[in-house]
Image (tube, rainbow, N blue to C red):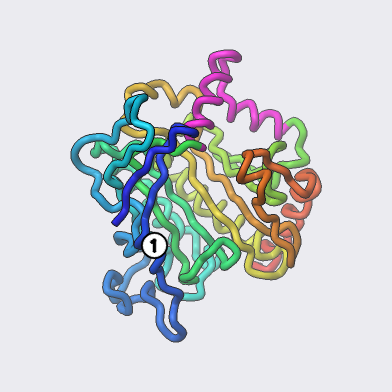
């Protein structure tokens, strides 16, 4: 049983999903994500999508939209409309992103794009959030390479805040905030890890994680399904390099949360968002050194007052060195 509960303090919804309490740790010698082993996984696949067995949103994505409650409704509950999906990256249980070739990873990017295109047809879906949790440090119980997708019936608060800030900047300056961020990073140079024709890969001046990398589209791309075939291949190669760079940094599996931020679906009130927002990927890696975790503690969680324990001008240089190390290992 899952439901949405309105938080009147923050003006957003909390997903309540008691069924997720019973998610299993993977037993030794068995993986439900390996070909033919799980009830949802076929004998052969390259990349594969299926419904999450323990969804936070479980009431489907058809029918009426979830509406913000009236002012007098202090405590308000709605059905947890939406969907949660698992996206398997490879049939190989031990594969890392950087073990897969660019053609394979392009199929993964295509699948991400196909799901956005699919949910455009369902007005109840307002936001498609594609993400990956990697490593036990962020709570991963199934190490087989995979990510997830949530199709929300509302716009998550952090996304809404980003869009509102970008809109306000556009109204003040007449420019896209992400374009100006890229220009600022290019002018400074110290925080850029690498660039391609269509993307800039850098540690933003303000990021709250020591290795909190951003991948930002240079063009006016709002959704991942708007990327051209060439740009999808380019993004696939970037993900291969970034994942290899991370593991090369401390010569150990590098945990992270990888989160794709894109536009809002099926919402006329956000018409014109392509002018001020931009498709990008944010990484939240919890390590601050090879053996130390940067915890999101009381200030960060309780007050949303982030504190970075490292200067990103220094950590960006470390990532550039790690990238060269990874590239050398591929020769």
Q: Position of residue 89 (x, y in %)?
A: 43, 63
In the rendered image, is residue 4 in sight? yes
Q: Bounds of the magenta span? A: 158-186
Residue 155 as seen in the image, left or right of residue 182: left
Residue at the location (64% across, 64% down)? 254
Looking at the image, the residue that sits furthest to the bottom is 29
Q: For residue 167: magenta? A: yes
Residue 228 higher or lower than 85, as above or below: above
Q: Between residues 273 and 27, which one lies in front from this camera angle?
A: 27
Q: Between residues 3 and 294, which one lies in front from this camera angle?
A: 3
Q: Mark 1 sits on what residue?
A: 20
Image quadrant containing the C terminus: bottom right
Q: Position of residue 285 (x, y in %)?
A: 63, 55
Q: In what element is the residue under mark 1? A: helix
Residue 41 as seen in the image, left or right of residue 188: left
In terms of image quadrants, where is residue 201? top right
Image quadrant containing the N terminus: bottom left
Residue at the location (29% across, 41% down)? 78
Q: Position of residue 210 (x, y in %)?
A: 72, 50
Question: What kind of secondary structure does the magenta stretch mostly adopt?
Answer: helix
Q: Position of residue 147 (x, y in %)?
A: 44, 59
Residue at the location (44% across, 63% down)? 146
Q: Residues within 10 Å of mark 1 (few under 14, many from 20)?
A: some
Looking at the image, the residue that sits furthest to the left is 63
Residue 180 higher or lower than 27, as above or below: above
């Amino acid at each position: 049983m899952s439901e949405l509960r309105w938080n009147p303090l923050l003006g957003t919804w909390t997903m309540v999903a008691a069924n997720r309490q019973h998610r299993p740790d993977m037993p030794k010698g068995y993986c439900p994500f390996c070909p033919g082993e799980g009830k949802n996984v076929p004998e052969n696949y390259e990349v594969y999508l299926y419904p999450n067995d323990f969804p936070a949103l479980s009431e489907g994505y058809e029918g009426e939209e979830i509406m913000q409650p009236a002012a007098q409704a202090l405590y308000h509950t709605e059905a947890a409309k939406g969907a949660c999906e698992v996206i398997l990256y490879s049939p190989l249980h031990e594969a890392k992103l950087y073990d897969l070739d660019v053609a394979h990873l392009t199929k993964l990017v295509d699948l991400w794009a196909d799901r956005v295109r699919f949910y455009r047809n369902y007005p109840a879906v307002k936001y498609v959030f594609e993400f990956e949790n990697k490593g036990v440090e962020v709570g991963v119980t199934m190490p087989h390479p995979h990510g997830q997708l949530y199709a929300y019936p509302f716009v998550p608060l952090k996304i809404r805040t980003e869009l509102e800030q970008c809109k306000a900047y556009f109204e003040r300056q007449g420019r896209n905030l992400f374009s100006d961020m890229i220009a600022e990073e290019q002018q400074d140079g110290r925080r850029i890890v690498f660039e391609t024709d269509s993307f800039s890969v850098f540690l933003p001046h303000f990021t709250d994680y020591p290795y909190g990398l951003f991948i930002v589209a240079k063009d006016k791309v709002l959704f991942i399904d708007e990327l051209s075939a060439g740009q999808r291949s380019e993004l696939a190669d970037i993900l291969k390099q970034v994942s290899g760079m991370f593991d090369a940094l401390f010569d150990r599996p590098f945990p992270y949360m990888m989160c794709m931020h894109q536009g809002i679906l099926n919402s006329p009130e956000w018409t014109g968002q392509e002018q001020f927002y931009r498709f990008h990927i944010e990484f939240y890696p919890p390590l601050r050194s090879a053996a130390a975790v940067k915890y999101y503690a009381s200030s960060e969680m309780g007050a949303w007052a982030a504190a970075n324990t490292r200067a990103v001008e220094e950590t960006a240089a470390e990532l550039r060195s790690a990238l060269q190390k990874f590239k050398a290992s591929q020769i």
